[in-house]
Amino acid sequence: MISRLVSSIANIMLSKPVLTNPTAGVEDLQVLKYDVGGEFVLHHDGEPRILTVIYYVNGVGGTWFPFANMGSEESEPPMVSSSRQDKQQRMITPQNKKQALELCKGFQPGKKGLLIKGSTTVNNNNESNEITDTGDDINPHITYIQQGDAIAFYNYKSDGSGELDWKALHAGIPADETKFIANHWFRVNKLSEY
């Protein structure tokens, strides 16, 4: 079943030149458990991982992308705030880890970038409860997932330069309940040739 899942993802998300590259492959599925308070600090999945897929096994979210939705104004969805400072900040795209970490100082999950949150909570009896009134329905910085959902994102710029895209910087914010996720990383060496 896992091999069919990996094959389907690869065929949907990766270009033919990448799929036929002899150095292309996928890492084994990694399953992670975050206990209450567990987190994974801001990081980039890095070379040579070109595509990351995160599966939300039990529907508990908590993944934050501080630079998501911070591209050019033309491709930008409407923002809650349109202050001059917000517009200037959106125009800055980090070029390396040091710059990315510096630029996102003071950013808060749910107020900047994109926060992936669970739409269910799991109680002590391992029963799920649907969250119906979140108060965040109109917040463009929060997206809700459910048990079994997955997200995928590219780690390189789409311009063919072979450069890392620092908008893929992300973190697992401190869990407020036990969280299980699984990851697949698709890899290719010598990306700049393709």
Image: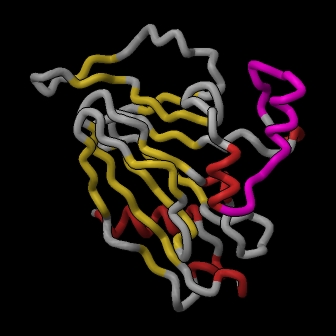
Instruction: Please state if 141 lies on the left or on the right of 26 as rendered.
Output: right
At a point 67% along the width and 48% down the height, the residue shown is: 102
| 156 left or right of 9 in image | right
Is residue 190 a member of the stretch shown in magenta? no
Quarter of the C terminus within the rendering: bottom right
Direction from residue 60 to residue 124 in the image, left or right: left
Question: Does residue 185 lie above or below 59 as drawn?
Answer: below
- The x and y percentages for residue 184 are 40, 63
In depth, the one of 46 and 142 nearer the eye is 46
Identify the residue at image location x=46%, y=56%.
Answer: 53
78 in magenta:
yes
**Which residue is at 30% across, 41% downward?**
38
Query: For the point 64% across and 78% down, which residue is it?
Result: 16
On the rendered image, what quadrant is the N terminus found in? bottom left
Does residue 128 show up? Answer: yes
Identify the magenta region: 77-96
Nearer-the-camera pick, 33 or 97 = 97
Q: Position of residue 178 (x, y in %)?
A: 23, 35
Colour scheme shown: secondary structure
Which residue is situated farthest in the left direction here? 125
Q: Is residue 70 above or below residue 32?
A: above
